[in-house]
Amino acid sequence: QLQASGGGLVQPGGPLRLSCEASGGSLDDHTIGWFRQAPGKEREGVSCIRASDRNTFYAASVKGRFTVSRDRVKNAGYLQMNSLTPEDTGLYYCATGARHIIASICRNPSYYDKWGQGTLVTVSS
């Protein structure tokens, strides 16, 4: 099972770090994807980090502000979010997919088969 955590209320410009923890299995052979869904909007692929080569990919809207990472020892993935804006508000999910997902579809939710419950991020003053 996957569990995303670390969400909360943060002021514009502030940081948050989300965690994705797995129980009952290893994340080591799986690409980890981060997705978000704002009210009334479709789920958006924010970032992903492949298991095969640890390459990372980002949505244009978060590139330079968000950093995705993974920790083999802790069996967890992370999404460091900096310079948050109200447009980053939403329910954030982590998910796992195949060991290697090609770049063009790495942020496509259709290629992920295990999902955790989301954690809510609210950016507001």
Image (tube, rainbow, N blue to C red):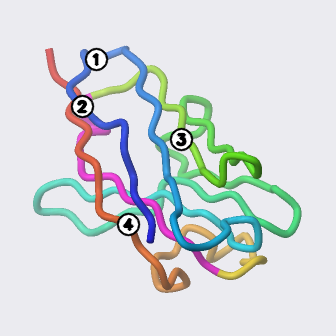
Reading the image, the residue beneath label 2 is 8
Instruction: Check disc 2: other Cα within 10 Å, few if <14, some if 14-19, many if 20+.
Output: some
Residue drawn at x 82%, y 56% as measured from the top left: 54
Q: Secondary structure at mark 3?
A: strand
Quick check: marks 1 and 4 in contact, CB under 8 Å?
Answer: no
Which labelled disc corresponds to residue 79?
3
Reading the image, the residue beneath label 1 is 12
Cα distance between the residues tagged 1 and 4: 26 Å
Q: Is residue 117 shown in magenta? A: no
Q: Is residue 101 left or right of residue 113?
A: right
The correct choice, above or below, for 118 with respect to 30 in the image is above
Label whose residue precedes the other's in the sequence (1 or 4): 1
Q: Secondary structure at mark 2?
A: strand
The amino acid marked with disc number 1 is: Pro
Label whose residue precedes the other's in the sequence (3 or 4): 3
- Nearest to the eye among marks 3 and 4: give it: 4
Quick check: marks 3 and 1 in contact, CB under 8 Å?
Answer: no
Q: Secondary structure at mark 1?
A: loop
Which labelled disc corresponds to residue 35?
none
Residue drawn at x 30%, y 63% as measured from the top left: 117
Q: Is residue 16 left or right of residue 90?
A: right
Specify start and end residues of the magenta stretch as a single range: 86-97
Question: Furthest residue to the front?
Answer: 24
Predominant secondary structure, magenta span: strand
Cα distance between the residues tagged 3 and 2: 14 Å
Q: Quadrant of the N terminus?
A: bottom left
Label whose residue precedes the other's in the sequence (3 or 2): 2
Q: Quadrant of the C terminus?
A: top left
Q: Residue 81's x, y, as percent?
A: 48, 31
The amino acid marked with disc number 3 is: Leu
The amino acid marked with disc number 2 is: Gly
Cα distance between the residues tagged 3 and 1: 17 Å
